[in-house]
Image (tube, helix red, strand yellow):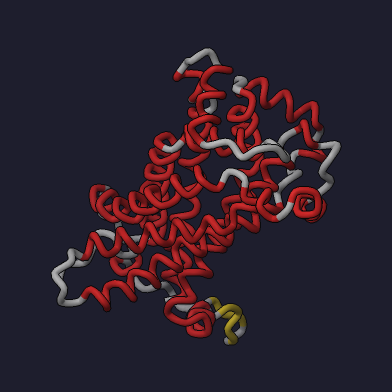
Amino acid sequence: MAVSTMDSESSRTPQPAPALTKGGYSVLSARALGAKLGTQGKHYFCGSFAAFTNIVVTFPIQKVLFRQQLHGVLATEAVQQLQRDGLRNLYRGLLPPLLQKSTTVAIMFGLYEDFSRVLLDRAAGSGIPELATRSFAAALAGTAEAILTPFERVQTLLQDHRHHGRFKNTVHTFRTLVTEHGVRECYRGLVPILIRNGPSNVLFFGLRGPIKEQLPEVNSRAGHMASDFVCGGLLGAALGIMFYPLNVVKSRAQSQVGGAFQPCKQVLLTVWRERGGSVAMLFRGATLNYHRSLLSWGIINATYELLLKELS
């Protein structure tokens, strides 16, 4: 049977080199760790570690992008805002995305594999195309990620300079929101996240296989890492542009504390009017988002596939 285009790329790559040794003793046995994690646990671990690496590298870029999404300013003005905030505030708000992204990407890859396995078993012999089954699994995994919306909510408040005097850190922000407004306040901006996550997951898992197949064939470990980086980066950048208006709506909605929950359409219209009804202004920051997504998802996809091979 032909391999599905939505399967992990690791099945088509060479086996990893033996574990590093020192004086005849194993320093790090990747295969032993993989055995402890189990067949499915490896996907969660690799996804989490890949996201952790990405966030630490790209967080300052994300802060510039966030300022552009929220205020509709040029990249130079956003950078100047960060300079005025000072170096000590550059990584302010790092913990929420670090926790949120390392967990959501773990869920993204791990639940996709779990849902795919279960649904494919149930759909066996039913005539349902494997692509449709895996697409549904990807959508379910993306929807499940939305449970971690509170982390994006807190990240938004900590990155918004207008709230620097009110919220001290991650724990203080969570406590203030829940105490003063209830748990529901932590899920402000949930709807655009749900609309974004499902379709983007379907496209990511559905297209990364075909995209990699179009790249030059490679045999070395470095070559596979480069291919995985390009494949993940191109997909991430394209999806980032496609769903950019939803992220603008999310950022605007989550920058509000208290008050009525406005529908996505109303928030979008408000931003549209404030920016003079200009599509270009609505996409202010999209260029930086494209390059950040190119780097971020390149790092995530390449790190994920590399670790998965090492643990196999």
Question: Residue lying farthest top?
Answer: 276
Please state the horizontal and vertical placement of residue 51, each as a whole percent of the image: 55, 56
Look at the image and tell me in which quarter the C terminus lies.
Answer: bottom left
Please state the horizontal and vertical placement of residue 40, each as a whole percent of the image: 44, 76
Please state the horizontal and vertical placement of residue 42, each as a whole percent of the image: 48, 74
- Frontmost residue, 35 versus 13: 35
Q: Residue at left 55%, top 48%? A: 190
Q: Residue at left 28%, top 55%? A: 209
In-image side of 282 versus 171 (left or right): left
Q: Residue at left 69%, top 55%? A: 183
- Frontmost residue, 285 versus 258: 258
Q: Residue at left 30%, top 64%? A: 7
In-image side of 124 versus 254 (left or right): left
Please state the horizontal and vertical placement of residue 25, each as a whole percent of the image: 59, 86
Count the labels in the image: 0
Q: Is residue 150 above or below residue 164?
A: below
Look at the image and tell me in which quarter the N terminus lies.
Answer: bottom left
- Frontmost residue, 11 versus 242: 242
- Frontmost residue, 87 versus 137: 137
In-image side of 10 versus 88 (left or right): left
| Image quadrant where residue 90 sits | top right
Question: Residue lying farthest front?
Answer: 260
Q: Is residue 245 above or below residue 48?
A: above
